[in-house]
Image (tube, rainbow, N blue to C red):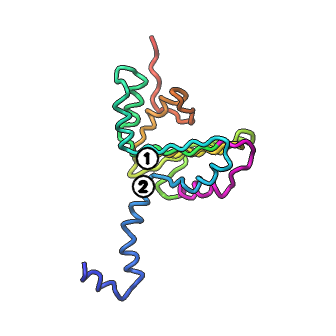
Amino acid sequence: MRSLFRIFAGTPALVALFLLAPAVTVRAQDPRIQLSHLDHLATRASQTVDVSVDERLIQLAAKIFNDKDEDEAQIKKLVSGLKGIYVKSFEFDNENEYSAADLDTIKSQLREPAWSRLVNVTSKREGNVEVYVSLVGGNVNGLTVLSAEPKELTVVNIVGPVDLEKLAKLEGSLGIPSLGIKSSKKPKDDQ
């Protein structure tokens, strides 16, 4: 290591690049969105939801689901392998309690090359919903939902392998909102 450092000692920029390269590589592949900058909105909100469930808690919760119950078995399959679920949601009594800058801090993280926007729903009355997926090697390793309504702001960040087929099957049930994700498989006829 010392000989390697001597080679780069004359070029500080190369030393910095050498030392920072592993951190940049790890961050580029990490689908966790930083949400702490939204914490200041809690003082303006009439209701705040802050969920932070890491991999350890997900594994513990998955043990509780009953494999014999079809809905619970599907949820268990969906959450297996997840690294975390993070949610920040703020409801306000008045409109315009959050700023475009608050949204930009989230969207700037979603502009990284690994992220792709999957769904964009825009409504002047009801607000906007955007769904992003993080892809590494063609596999989904993260999902972020950004919902910006006039009196509500919600960000959901799921870290880990997300099976969009399974997620599409659960849309609109079990409290999972409809995200507009279409399953590529045709439903079976009940005959």
User: Can you give x and y, in whole percent of width and height, for residue 133 in the image?
Assistant: 49, 47
Q: What span is in magenta? A: 91-111
Q: For the point 40% across and 36% down, which residue is it?
A: 79
Residue 13 part of the magenta segment: no
Residue 30's tag is: 2
**Foreground pick, 180 / 128:** 128
Query: Seen in the image, is 73 located left or right of residue 126?
Result: left
Relative to 106, residue 173 above or below: above
Tell me the kind of residue under disc 2.
Answer: Asp
Q: Quadrant of the N terminus?
A: bottom left
Tell me the kind of residue under disc 1.
Answer: Val
| Mark 1 and mark 2: Cα distance apart in space | 8 Å
User: Can you give x and y, in whole percent of width and height, for residue 5 in the image?
Assistant: 29, 82
Q: Which residue is mark 1?
A: 159
Q: For the point 46% across and 43% down, which residue is it?
A: 85
**Foreground pick, 50 / 87:** 50
User: Can you give x and y, in whole percent of width and height, for residue 62 in the image?
Assistant: 36, 33
Q: Count of labels shown?
A: 2
Q: Secondary structure at mark 2?
A: loop
Observer able to see residue 51: yes
